Amino acid sequence: MDGVRTPVPDRDTYLARWSALHGGYDPLGGLWLVRAWLTLVHRVASPLAAHRVPPSAVTAAGVAVTALALPAAAAGGHWPLLAVLMMLLGGVADSLDGAVAVLTDRASAWGYLLDSVADRCGDLLYLVALWYAGAPGGLLVAAGCALGLLEYTRARGGNAGFGQIGVVTVGERPTRLIVAAFGLAGAGIVPGLAGFAGTVAAGATFAVCAVGLGQLLTTLHAALSNEPPPRN
């Protein structure tokens, strides 16, 4: 922050540290898309790490940028296209904060908690943006409940002893971001169909979260059925 640059670990070191924080999943031997994404994140996060930007500042910036999508979505016309841009930038920041923490050796339980809270704020902002676009409130409430139940179940599964990264469902946050972005893009491209586009996106959000919940519960049932309950 004061102009002093610090050495930044190379990509392989970053991937090794990332693996240690994510249940031992090896991105070098895993899905190429994960490896490609993490390589991109490393390149973008490296200048921030070199200038010692705090990971929490990146987290806060991501939420603030995502919040800028709301006035754009509410303005109608072609303005929802700007909302899409703000949401995508916020999504990138959501990945950068963890990368900066890993690169600067500042990953912590507090940072993990702060990132989780920021993620839920982002999810709420996506739904509100779709409401501004014309999606019905009842459907958005249902989508929010399905989303919240999915994330709550994941958190409780972790508390029960399931810490694997291998549970990737169709309802993950990147999917929800893409669905909301498509809905707002449709609203911005064809303003006369904004309500329809928002409704489709809200319904799709509910669907992917409901299916994702089923996938997660199936995996957790198989993994935890024979495990003793955690001590309080």
Image (cartoon, rainbow, N blue to C red):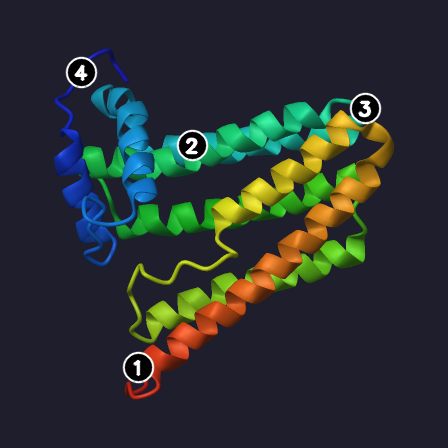
Q: Are marks 2 and 4 in contact (CB under 8 Å)?
A: no
Q: Label 3 belongs to which residue?
A: 77
Question: Which residue is identified by label 1?
Answer: 230
Residue 107 % position (x, y): 24, 44
Earlier in the chain: of badge 4 and badge 3, it is 4
Left or right, residue 5 beside residue 72? left
Give the CA distance from mark 4 to mark 3. 44 Å
Nearer to us of marks 1 and 2 is 2
Image depth: mark 2 or mark 4 in front: 2
In the picture of the structure, the residue carrying the numbered disc 4 is 5
Q: Could you tell me which residue is drawn at 41 percent across and 71 percent down?
A: 156
Q: Residue visible at 77% across and 38% down?
A: 132
Q: How far separated are the C-alphas under marks 1 and 4?
A: 45 Å
Q: Amino acid at mark 4?
A: Arg
Element at label 2: helix
Cα distance between the residues tagged 1 and 2 = 34 Å
Q: Residue type at mark 3?
A: Gly
- Residue 25 visible to the viewer: yes
Q: Amino acid at mark 2?
A: Ala
